[in-house]
Image (cartoon, coloured by chain):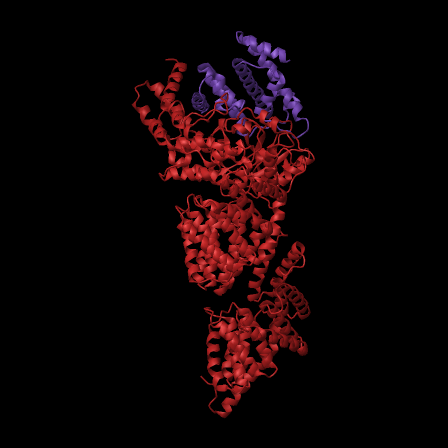
Amino acid sequence: MSEDATWREADLILDRLLNAPDSERDDELARLNIAPAVRDRAQQLLAAHRRQRGVLEQPFCESVALNALSGRRLGRWVLEQEIGRGGMAVVYRARSVEAPAGQAAALKVLTVGALAGDGVRRFREEQQILARLRHPHIAALIDSGVSEDGTPWFAMALVEGQRIDNWCRTRGLGIREQVRLFLDVCAAVEYAHRSLIIHRDLKPSNVLVDGEGHVRLLDFGIARLADTDGTERTLTQSRVLTPQYAAPEQLGGAPPSTSMDVYGLGALLYTMLTGRSPRDLSADPQATPTLPSLAVATGGDPTATGIDRARREIRGDLDAILLKALAGEVELRYVSVAALQADLTRWLNGLPVEARVPSLRYRLGKFIRRNRLGMSASLAIVLALGAGAIGTLWQSARAREEAARALAEAQRADAVRDFLVELFRANDPDSTGGKTPDLLSILAKGAERAERADALPLRARAELLSTIGSIYANLGRYAEAEPLLDRGIALWKADPSIADPERFKPRLARVALLTSQGKTQKAIEEGKAVVDEIRASKDPPPSLVASALVRLVETKAVAGAVDASTRAESASAVALTRQLIPPDTLALGHALHNQAMVELDLDALPSAETAARESIKNYEAAGAEGLHALRASLMTLGRILSDQNRHADALEVYARGVQITRDTYGADHVYLARALNSYAVELNTNGKFAEAIGMLNESIAIQRKALGDTPRLAPSLFNLAFAQESLAEYAQAVENLGEALRLQQSEHGASDARVLQIMGNLARVRTEMGQVDAARTLFDEIDARLSALPKKVSNRTEAETALKLASFQLMEGHPESALQWIEQAQAVLAKGIRNLDVLALKADLLQAEAQYRSGNAAAARPTWDRALGQLRGMAPELRYYFYEQHLTAARFALRLGDGSTAAQLLAVSEAALVDHPMAPRFAVDRAELLAAAKGWEGDRRNNSAPEPGAH
Amino acid sequence: MTGEITQLLSQARTDQQALGKVFVLLYDELRRLAKSNASGAEKTLSPTVLIHEAYLRLLGNAQLSLNDRRHFLACAARAMRAIWIDHVRRRTALKRGGPEQDLPLDMAELVPASPQSSEELLALDQALDRLDALNRRQREVVELHYFAGLEFAEIGELLDCSERTAKREWERARAFLYAQMQ
């Protein structure tokens, strides 16, 4: 046989072998009865076929250009080797040469033509939005820019991997495994949709799998960015070479929507399972694609092992799911990626899928179109926007300012604006012709239309009003939100026969609204009622029960009404959220964070810590939205650690919280100010006053710039003054306390616990400055205000103030009055369940002193013993307090004539003085006390009389 | 120009010689396009876009029959291959210290992906010729996919077979080529 003929034979054999799965090919070849020469060639072919990489797997040249791009510099990147090419861009491996240097990235240079002027501006704005996409399954956008000649480029995280369909094929993955892998892709797209970013170009070559089997999506939103001022049509035409994965309406030039991505995902899964794209090039885009199970059987090339098995697994439900995702009409498709995910998950678990039933949305859409309202698309999107909890309301007082900030951000977010503009423009021909409406007027218009929409069925109107109301509430616009929510609720009530779980959502939104307005009692009542009704209703969705519970728990916490039942409720919420399908890490994070705060309130610190840590893990897994809540969760963990006296750990956590907040929100954001504040408090506790001052100055600067002269500044000013006082910067401390006092008093009135606390500190500083008269005036005022309160001292803050007052009174020689205040304070402090309470310790020491001074040495003794016991258990990390308390105790010991204990205490606390910023101040006291202690010892030796107070 | 190519393509339905002429026209056109498009300093073009532009430029809105379209793209792919191999040969000759050849300015800066790939590409070129002798269709598939950057669905359409078959042809061709290049 000739050489040629041999090869031809071998080629035919290869063809035959390729019909079998890879694992069987060698065996099958062995079984064939063929000439040795042919066998040899066939083996060569088989081996060659198995090669992973070779010259045919790389592009055959750099792009055809006069100046090749290798070695060229773009921004802080140097282009190295070309790694791929697409219809409108070339991709290079690149390395950064400016800080941070040494980074590797995939740099994509767009070849579609230069950008100019407005295009450049738009490009840069879009880049900011895309850069916020942070998800384990999305190749992050690291950098981007426009070169001098107008060529746009992007740097993305470098992904070394194979196309997802090839990857599955190479490994012979089964259908179920492929679906699971595909769900990762869905998660990434869904996350992007929550950030209002659509991919628009989903296809197998844009989904890579790396060496560890980890999926990464490329080119998010880049299709969108590539079109500038209407060159979209040209682009589509020039990409006409591969349109098989585009949704039909996309080919028709429709404005972007999430449904296009749903289609893209469907096309992707279809290709993975059947080995071919759902639509032939020449086929009518609206036509139904071939049933996947049939496609597999009649000439498809499944990546799974064996055609028959593939066909069996896909037939039926999976067919239905794919066809629903690939429906030509948007209304017949899955309404969101989450819906697709849910159905696939149901399929994996052997549960019935939704795909078979025509959706309500479809029917509703038809109804609306019949009535020529033309709002079907906007209805779908607006409903999607309105979903979701408002998030932790813990610091409800803050909510208003944060909402203002959120609104400002929302207005600046081009994505939101463009999205809604495109939709409303498409649906409302007489709208503002050219001017871009802002978010609020769009909402107002939406609300107005919803009110007038008598033709809509009740349920649709109710849903619409409730949704818009929720959006207002989310933005903190409570005045606008309230009437809409009430209307929505009333409409639902008007027809009690409707059993749709949707009807609870506006009521939950109203609970949050009431809480934010401070009407906590009503909020709790309403919250309880809603939870009960939901539970009593038919088949309540577990996610709804969970979010209702979370809402109720939050409200109770804000109201300070946390008790054992709250604990059960929050545990219940966590349990329910864990069971959600598909798993919702963000919701679980919220539920766990709430639980952590409840446990913290009840002083169950270990369980609080566990919950907080787990909530952090979940937030970390939830992408950008999780980052926002992660910050709050870290602060909570910090508090928990601090309360356990694990101060080094607490500092680390706070530092991390600050870092994340800074990275996520930038240097001007109010969230950063709050994070800095919390961190500074912990720094103060640890005696790191200089650092605390730095943080607080930054925090205050941010707050002033963002919010002006707001009472919110008071805590930061107070903390700053404390640090300054500790460093003996008295003048500044006084100034800051003065401003804090003014601000706090203007908002909360004269008898507010914090106002008194500030006054107390102010008075104390005056004392330290030697301005005793000024101090006395202040303390007299404090005395008067506290006495005027119904319960005098009813919380920790007031207790702290009472102790300061008592201390002063003691100093002025009024031990009896001091004792009264001390007892009041102790009554409150005794209710706490903490291990070591510095405040209680202070109270005890003070009490012992007061008792002694009022001539009651007998009572002083046991008090002193108790205090000493606590002192011995004190954490040395609390250096500042450690030293101060030991000094006080030593002083008192001497008073009792106990020189040796005094010396002991001084010795123990000596280590705490090393490097202490206040060492010089203490040095004098210390020296005096040491001398006194020694003197006393000397006397004792001389007298050899029994010492009072020896033990 | 439009008229000429269309005419040639319709001639090519029966006359193989005409195809050769189409090829020559395309070769020149593509090189010209690469040069003119690159004047602006940093513009880049992928072969796919280049071919598409050539298509538009040469044929405008003329409706081509599938067969004609097939011929056009096959020629274009062939032309890309030829242009590139030409260039690689010249550079290799240069590196070996051969006689100083006047490099055409428009290709002066083309840089292969890596030093080895020049040799590999030359080997590939030879292997492709070998493949052509055995199985013309497989050679066509390789050119359309590798040099013109077309997807298998389109190749299937052009060659009047299923996407699956096109992909299978590629796999077989690839195996042969790699086996030859060992």
Residue A74 in view here: no
User: Could you tell whether B154 is left or right of A357 in the image?
Assistant: right
Q: Where does the image place residue A764, in percent across and percent down from the top left?
A: 62, 74
Which x, y percent locates residue A386?
53, 44
Quadrant of the drawing holding the N terminus of chain A: top left
Quadrant where the image shows the C terminus of chain A: bottom left
| Residue B169 visible in the current orientation | yes
Residue A79 in the image: state x and y as whole percent. 60, 36
Chain that the image shows in purple: B
Q: In this rendering, is residue A123 above or below A639?
A: above
Is A451 positioned to the left or the right of A354 in the image? right
Residue A360 x/y as whole percent? 46, 36
Frontmost residue, A718 versus A248: A248
- In-image side of A208 versus A317 (left or right): right
**Location of residue A25 (image quadrant):** top left
Residue closer to the observer: A397 or A458: A458
- Above or below, B22 against A105 in this view is above
User: Quadrant of residue A66 in the image?
Assistant: top right
Total marks shown come to 0
- Indicate whether B38 appears above or below A725: above
Q: Is residue A141 above or below residue B58?
A: below
Q: Which chain is red?
A: A
Q: Is residue A3 left or right of residue A94?
A: left
